[in-house]
Image: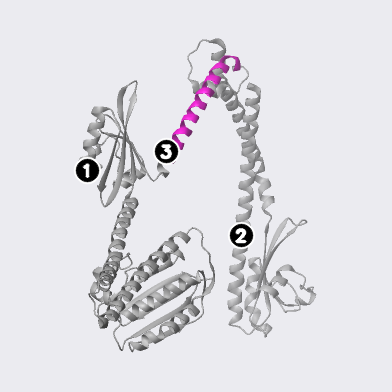
Amino acid sequence: MKRKIHVNVAVLSTSITILVAVFMLMTFYRFHTDNQMNSLKNTGNLISNILISSDVSDINELDQLKHYKGTNTRITLLNRSGDVVFDNMADTKNMENHRDRPEFLDAIENSQGESIRYSATMGYDTYYYALKLQNNLILRVSYQTENIFNMFSLILPVIVMIVILISIISYYTSFLLANHILKPINILTKNLEGNFQAGDLEELSVYDEISPFIRTFKNQNKLILDRNIELEEKANLLDVISSSMGEGIILLDINTKIISINKSGIKLFNGRNNVSLAGQDFIRLCRDLNLNEALEIAIEEKSSKEIIIHHNSKYLDVYINPVLREQRLTGLLLLVVDTTEKHKLDLMRREFSANVSHELKTPLTSINGYAEMIESGMVKGEDITKFASIIRKEGGRLLNLIGDIIKLSKIEDDANEKKLEPINVYFVGKEAISTLESLALDKDIELELTGESSFIMGNKGMLQDLIYNLLENSIKYTNPGGSIQLSVVHNNLDTIVKIKDTGIGIPSEHQDRIFERFYIVDKSRSKKNQSTGLGLSIVKHIVEYHNGKIHLESEVGKGTKITIKFKSI
């Protein structure tokens, strides 16, 4: 093993040295050729500028280029056929055609070209640069220089000596390195009872020489590592689960100091996620007096508690459970559940029941009263017709109310099993306009339909009720001489339905609640129009049934605009 380390390190060092030397030679060669070519290009561009200011068609004008003859820079002018027109170092009559030269071909095609050719007999490199002039002549300049590899041959012995020197140094360095690596193994071999760190033994376990001594330690280390990984995975899993829960989980010690809390627990109490709450008193998270008293009682009695608190506009159910170890209290575990929606639903259910009872009781009381008067004979013949008419109106109001309640229930029941089909919303609006046209004419109200055909996946009956209810509502609350405009527009991927009227408008303080069940802005006007207070609530439920969005804009005395957005198909 010592010999392997010794040889491998020495070979590696020598190989790297040779590669670095080759890389440096190649880099120098690349730099040399680029430098020579750039110098030649500069000369070519300079000469081309001189030729631009001269009459190139007159050979006598080219005599000014003769002075370049002593500079080792050869200047040649060629026509597009490759024939030599001028050369500062040779007689053009004896020169062959140059149309097969690569630099000439590149200049013809790309306006300029370059090449390097090596002469094996002379040992020189010739650099060529060709440039197409404005008069379609080709200017070629060339320059001869000693081949770079010939120059390298002069310094090659020095490079070889450096490589040999580095190889010798690497050989002795690898010898010292091998001894250093094997030193701990030698110590382990001589000292079976040595006190070593587990990590050091793990590093040395790859060597056969010490495997009998550290196999037991290695097995123990593996067992501990596996246990640590298992515990870490369980901790990470528990952290992921608790972080993903919507419920808050809080662990307190017997002094009600926070040991741990998940993100939901912080969020439910409106704490800041970027502040560490570990070690802080629970009262800093929540100052609710009833909850903190319940915590104290749970600690004293070592018993479970459940309490509902109203905190920051939320209803929170807090389940307090003692954490016992051998009948000794070690802390409290709190499970916090946000039941705000449940309380809101309960409140809505109670309000709905009370409103339904009230709305049903009013017409029934009126019907029952007039019926008793007719039955007892207290009503004269000419009043019977009047009372019967009242009973009929109240009965119709009652039927309308029951019908609206049934519609709401049906929409909610069908929400889980939707039956949708392609519906042309513009056509539905056209039907609603046609149905309500006579009602609008009676009030001298102008109904107008604009837009275009636009299809959505929907329930036709519900969409008919939606547009009919909105238009009828606008007619009810628009004064004679006003106007109502219904528009259906296909906008990119959406179908936009807008109903705009010039009615009485809705005060701003009522606009947030206008879609609630049985909510009525003006009860006196509503009674006159026989409104049940469920029309706009039905509209909202139908929009939600179709996954749409509804927006209301209104100003008192100027009118109301309702915009509904559906997903088009």
Question: Which residue is disc 3 drawn over?
Answer: 239
Q: Nearer the viewer, residue 368 or 473?
A: 368
Which numbered marker is on residue 288? 1
Q: Earlier in the sequence, mark 1 or mark 3?
A: 3
Q: Which residue: 62% across, 61% down?
A: 36
Q: What's the residue type where badge 2 is placed?
A: Asp
Residue at image position (33%, 67%) is 515
The residue range painted magenta reads: 211-240
Foreground: disc 1 or disc 2: 1
Q: Residue at x 63, y 19 (%)?
A: 208
Q: Secondary structure under badge 2?
A: helix
Residue 306 as seen in the image, left or right of residue 432: left
Structure colour scheme: one colour
Secondary structure under badge 1? loop
Crowding near pointer 2: few (<14 within 10 Å), some, many (20+)? few
* Left or right, 121 with reference to 377: right
Q: Nearer the viewer, mark 1 or mark 3?
A: 1
Residue 34 shows which numbered tag?
2
Frontmost residue, 193 versus 190 = 193
Answer yes or no: is residue 273 visible: no
